[in-house]
Amino acid sequence: MIEYALLFALACYGAALLMNIYRIVIAPGVGDRVLALDTLVINIIALITLFGIHQSSTMYFEASLIIAMTGFVSTVSYTRFMLRGDIIE
Amino acid sequence: MDTGGNFLPIIAALPFVGALIPGVMIRAGRTACATYTFMASALAFILLMLSAPAVFRGEVLQFQLEWLPMLGLNVNFMLDGLGLLFAGLILGIGMLIILYARFYLSREDPMGQFYTYLLLFQGAMVGIVLSDNILLLLVFWELTSLSSFLLIGYWKHLPEGRQGARMALTVTGLGGLAMIAGMLILGSIVGSYDLSVILQHKELIQASPYYLPALILILAGCFTKSAQFPFHFWLPHAMAAPTPVSAYLHSATMVKAGLFLMARMWPVLSGTPEWFYIVATTGLITMVLGAVIALFKDDLKALLAFSTVSHLGLITMLLGFGTEAAAIVAVFHILNHATFKAALFMSAGIVDHETHTRDIKRLGGLRHLMPVTFVIVTIAALSMAGIPPLNGFLSKEMMLEEASHTAWLSNPWILPALATLGALFSVAYSFRLVAHVFLGPKRDDYPAKPHDPAFGMWASPAFLVVLVVLIGLMPNLIAGPLVDITAAAVTGGHPHAHISHWHGLVPAFWMSVAAILGGALFLSLHGALERGWNAAPRPEAKVIFDAITRASTRASHWLTDTLHNGSITRYGAIFAAAITAAGLFAWFESPMSAPTREMLPINAIMAIGWVLLVISTGCIIAFHRNRILSLVLLGVIGLAVSMAFVYFSAPDLALTQISVEVVTIILLLLALNFLPGRTPVESGMPRRLRDAVIAGAAGLAVGGLTYAILLRDFAAESISAYHLANSYKGGGGKNVVNVILVDFRGFDTFGEIIVLGIAALVIYALTKSVLRGPGGRWLLNWGPDDDEAGDRHPLMMVVVTRVIMPIALMVGAYIFLRGHNAPGGGFIAGLIVAIALLMQYMASGFAWAEERQRYHYHAMIAAGVMTAAVTGMGSWLAGRQFLTSSYGYIHIPPIEEFEWATAMAFDTGVFITVVGAVMLALHSLSSMSRRTGEQVNIHPMDVDPGRGAAPADGKEA
């Protein structure tokens, strides 16, 4: 059962990645692109975690942990750059 | 006598050590300076004399010390007859020159410098003649080129001096390069670089197919150094040097180095037709040509210079004959030439010093004004002309005797005839030297009033002239034994020199008579001959040399400027095209083996990752002028790559890639703030098309190569198995990647963190200098074009980063500690901690965070590198090599047993360096925008609910 659930989840997140890249390439403004990139980061965290479950390994947990912990920093940097230009004032 | 060999390195080192003295002693006065310089040479000379008795008994003294044995480069010295003769000449005449130079140099000349150069040169020369290892010999050989450059260019204010020095360095330096190649070939034929071994293998060397290339290359070195045709032209131009230098370099030392080497290599290289025709012919041409030109030179020193060229040719020719008897004569003439030529050069210096001119046309009738100099010059010049009973006569007669029965291309007449012609001109210019300078009517238009110099100045040439006479009168008593052992060393046999004045009415006698009579006749016809000479067209060596130098300089400039024009596009294009061409060449040259691996199946998720990569890469090309969009797409590529690392079981790489990605984005955004949003179009369509073709070809080539490699097993056995097997056993860690970084390849990592630290310091220095220059003033008045929106320090962000800080540090510590056995390590941990700190900068502002930063990032870099270095050196205490790690287990009761490893301390160094370097780089870049005159906030955030409402932008005091 878990096998099917995993495959379904992987398929969903894979599709999400494609949609993210579409929004990054074709978008009305920079804000949309950054938002899409942020979502892409979240989706990749999910994918790596799912992959770890699939492989029954804890080896991949740190990767998703670190992306989760630091990934938002780049999003914040982009938004600061868009809003104020200078990201460290 | 075993201790004799131990003197050799001291003899070679003494001049070098002594070279340090004159610069200091010059403060104590010129005489003191000269005395101490003299003592350095004298000490070396005394040690040489102490070693001499053993050499006269037929022993070969040796000294051996391993330096770089794996390269065959050892500090081996030996002293045999040949070395003794040359070392004696170098040190003996060196002492006379030191004495002479004390009086020759004027108060304006920096004497300390002169003596330092002179001793450096002396040391290099002694090194050449004592070396028993041809690689060591080459080192000294290059040192003579360099130190003679300094000596020849000693009068830096004279353009002739500088040009002459440059020419000498170019010619002898090029010859030296050729000789390096020749010596390496010789060494590889024999399989040893030790002279004493090489000299045993005559048959092996002459049978080798590489004999001729080695011979030509080595002779190129000898001929350039010894000013043989067609490289003779540098020597006269080197006469721009002060006379003591000319006397030293061109009588006894530098130019004799080439002869020395030919004599040294004589046992193994000579005796073949190639040797005879190259060496003897070159020597013959040089001898005649030098003598002819010398007759028509009006400058005293130029005359002597060309006569030196001629005499060097004579000795070269004798060595070229390849017979034992000729080698004896060559050795004897080396000794004789050194004595009379040094005396003549010093006397020419005296004339120049006292009359202020060296132009023979302006001199004459000096015999009454300078009687002492007159006597010295006359005896030395007669010896040079070969008049009995002086020493020059003895060796010249013996030379003619050898020439008289040597056939050239089976023609018995050419060689004796040309040798006689050379001797004839030699007589003519020697007579002219005496007749046109000292004889004739006294003149009243000398530039200065001539008189004999002080005793100190003529003592050295006088001493040499006494030797000239003594050797001439009692050759077998004074020079005989020395010539015998030297010739024995050259030929490897036991020759005995029969030196006598009268050989009977042999051909040599008549040749000698013809030369003397003809020489006298030519001198009487000198005026007419000179008019003819001046009217005749002849190539000017300096013009040709300058033209060649100019042309090669222009070609180098053209090549360099074409390849390095400052455009990164061009570098990229050249690099890509060259690598692709080399790859294609290899591809077509060697056939590919059939694929040995199966294609793996592809799953849907990986396909999506691939699509992500391809789309983002393609879009970067399409949108690359929009900088922020390119950065976003780069982020996507980075994430896709880290996903691939995860999928292909490389968690360490994935962790590194993720954290590097974040830091890169922050760095680039900081830089983008100062750049326009779009890259302008700078090149036309054809150029972009060309670049596209190159880039496309290179990309396809790399792709194809990767594809080909992935389908095949490695040609050589992979080293992975070794690392897997030894990681825990040798390095004490289960994470092989980390053990490779801190142990197997620890030295690489050590170098890399140093580079990282340097890079950060360079960024710091660059921003500092930009801020100080016009860029800084521009930045002061610079502000963002559009209005800024939002808060400077939003409450949400400040709170989140504060909360996340301890967690991030905890994760960093965890990743660091487990790094040795599971994915992680100092580098990744350093990046995570740096990101955690950066968040604080971003949230509460640069100044606020800076105030709470207690350690300088420079110091952190230094501390990190030092930690790593000290850890590495710690293994020395255990008697092991740098960075050998050790490990063990510790059990403290409440905690489980855990492992410690010295690699941990090394990793700490990596960690600290990474944090320091990343923070310093970002700190430097962000400090650039701080100069826009904004006010500094005191509170961490704009709106603090606990503090009550505060005005925005932190304007509250």
Image (cartoon, coloured by chain):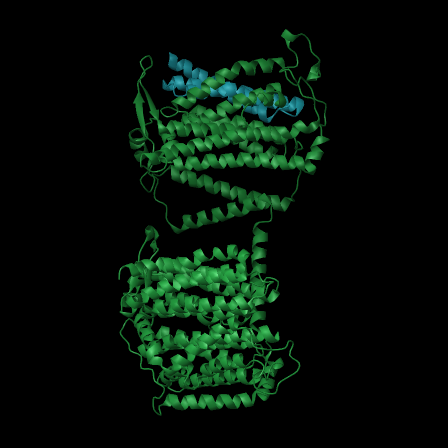
Chain colours: A cyan, B green
Residue B847 is drawn in which quadrant? top right
- The residue lying toward the viewer, choosing from A80 and B918, is B918
How many numbered marks appear? 0
- For the C terminus of chain B, the quadrant is top right
- Residue B212 in sight in this render: yes
B843 up-or-down from B44: above or below: above
- The residue lying toward the viewer, choosing from B415 and B882, is B882
- On screen, residue B583 versus residue B156, left or right, reads left
- Residue B598 in sight in this render: no
- The residue lying toward the viewer, choosing from B380 and B860, is B380
B597 up-or-down from B661: above or below: below
- For the N terminus of chain B, the quadrant is bottom left
- Residue B395 lies, in percent from the top left, at 39, 81
- Residue B584 lies, in percent from the top left, at 45, 48
- Residue A89 lies, in percent from the top left, at 64, 23
- Residue B729 lies, in percent from the top left, at 28, 30
- Name the residue at the bottom extreme: B505
- The residue lying toward the viewer, choosing from B832 and B137, is B137
Residue B438 is drawn in which quadrant? bottom right
Q: Residue at position x 53%, y 59% from top?
A: B112
B260 up-or-down from B640: above or below: below
B922 up-or-down from B169: above or below: above
Q: Residue at position x 50%, y 80% from top?
A: B377
Residue B48 is drawn in which quadrant? bottom left
- On screen, residue B135 versus residue B692, left or right, reads left
Q: Residue at position x 32%, y 54% from top?
A: B65
